[in-house]
Image (cartoon, grey):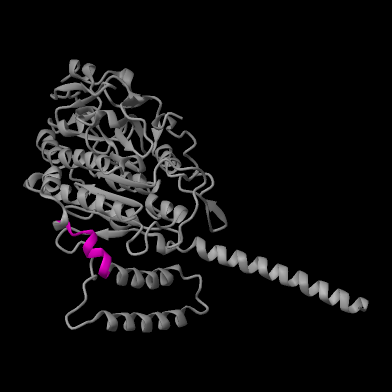
Amino acid sequence: MSRRALLRGAGSGLGAMAMAAMLAEDAQAAKVHDPTVPRKPHHTPKAKSVIFLFMEGAPSHIDLLDPKPKLNELHGQPMPASFGRPITAMGTAGNTLMGSPRKWKQHGKGGIWISELYPHVAKHADKLAVVRSCISNGLNHAGGVSQMNTGDILSGRPSLGAWVTYGLGTANKNLPTFVSMIDEREPFGNAKNWGSGFLPAVYQGTLFRQGPNPILNTKLSEGQTDERQRGRLEYLDSLNRGYMVGREDDTGLEARIRSFELAYALQSSGPEAVDLSKETEETKELYGLNKPETAVFGRNCLMGRRLLERGVRFVELYCGSGSGWDAHSNLEGNHGKWCKASDQPVAALLEDLERRGMLDETLVIWGGEFGRTPFNEKGDGRDHNPWGFSMFFAGGGVKGGQTIGSTDEIGLRAVERPAHVHDLHSSILWLLGLNHLQLTYLHNGRAERPTMLGGESMVKELWGG
C-alpha cells in the first residue's frame, strides 16, 4: 500500500468516526426535545409522579395549620412594633390584629396541629409533613400564582410541570405527561401556569376542563371513521413536515404536530381515563361526588388518581381557581366554603392512593400562592402574606407526621428554617430524581434552570435527608 492510500484510508476512517459521533449527538438532541422518550433521572427517585393540590387565592395558615395563641391574646390590638411593619397588597399593615376563632387539636403520633376546618385531612396527619415556614415574593395573586408555578413572579418562564416533563420524559404513550385541571374559572395567569416558557412547546401542560368532556376535540365528528381520521392526520402530518424544512427551530410547529398525534391517541384513551362511571359507588362517595359542596373538586381528585394510574407524571388540580380562597372579607364564610369543598376530597385522595399501593410513589402537595396576614382587613378578613405560610406534603418518599419550620408568634414571618418557593421546587425535583443544578436548558446563551439562582436550601427534612 502506498503512503497516499494509507493516509486517504486513515483520513476517511477518522471522518467517518467524527460523522458517527455528530449523528449520535443529533439523535440525542432530538430525544431531549421528544417528550415521548422516557429519560433517566439524575439519581434514584423517591417519587415517580406528582399531584399538586393548588388552593388558589391563598388559604389562611393561621386558621388551618399554624395555631397562634399569642395572636389570640393580642386580638383587637395594634401590632407590636417589634414584629415590623410590612408593605401589604391592600395597605392593611396598620390594622389591628385578628385572632383565629378556630378550635385546634393535635393529630396522629406526630402530634400535628390541624384546625377544625380540616377534620378529614386530620385523620391522615401521620402521612403529612407540614412546612410552616414557606416564603414567596408575590404580593398579589398574579405574581404569587406565577411564582409557585414557574419560580418567577413575572410570567414567561417554564412551569414546574414542564421542567419535570423535560427532565424525565413520559411514562405513557396515549395521554399527556402533564395535566392541569380547573374548577370554577381560569386561574390567574391562565395557560402561563402550565406553559413551557422558553422550553420547546411540546413540554407544556394540557388543560382539562369541567363537564362531561374535560378534553376538548377528542370525540370523532359525526360521520367520521377512525380510518378516515387516521388518513387525514397522515396527510396533514406530511404537509406540516414539508413546511418544517428550513424551520427546524420552530418548536411551536413541532409541538402542534405532536399535539395532533396526541389528540388522535386521546380519542381512544382519553374518554376512558376520565370516565368515572367505572368507579365503585364506595369510591365515589369517598371523594364526595354525592354531595354538591364536594362534587367538583372530588371529581377532579378522582380523575387525577386515574390519570396517575395511567402514567401521567404531573397533575395539578386547582381548588378555587380564579382566587376563590381570597378572603379579604368574611373569612369565615369564604374558608367555610372552600374547606368543605376540599377537605374530604383531599383526604379521600390520600386514602385511595395508599390502599392502591400508589402513595409511596406519588408526591402529594397541598398549598396556595401565599398565606394570609394576622391583622384584619375590613374587620373580618385577612390580607396577603408571602412572608410566612404553610404547605403540606405526603407520599413519594416524604417522612410524615412532622412539622418543619415555624413562623413568629403572630404568624407574620417565617423565623425558623425559612423555605423559599425555589427551595420547595428544588426539593420536589430532588424527590423525583432530578438535581435542579443539572436540569438546564440553553436559552439566549445562558444555561437556565428551574430554580433560577435559588433553590440551594432544599427542605431535606421532608425525606429525612
- x, y percent for residue 369: 29, 41
Query: Relative to the observer, which residue lies in front, 49 or 33?
Result: 49
- Looking at the rendered structure, the number of numbered marks drawn on it comes to 0
Q: Is residue 177 visible?
A: yes
Residue 97 in the image, given as x and y percentages of width and height: 20, 23
Residues rendered magenta in the picture: 267-276
Q: Does any portion of residue 322 appear in the rendered image?
A: no
Quarter assignment of residue 370? top left
The N terminus, quarter of image: bottom right
Percent of width and height locating residue 445:
57, 57
When the figure is inspected, residue 396 is found, relative to residue 206, above or below; the finding is above
Tell me if residue 75 comes above or below residue 437 in the rendering: above
Depicted 307 relative to depicted 248: above or below:
above
Q: Residue 268 magenta-drawn?
A: yes
The residue at the point 22 percent across, 39 percent down is 351
Please state if 448 lies on the left or on the right of 158 as rendered: right
Residue sitting at the far right: 2
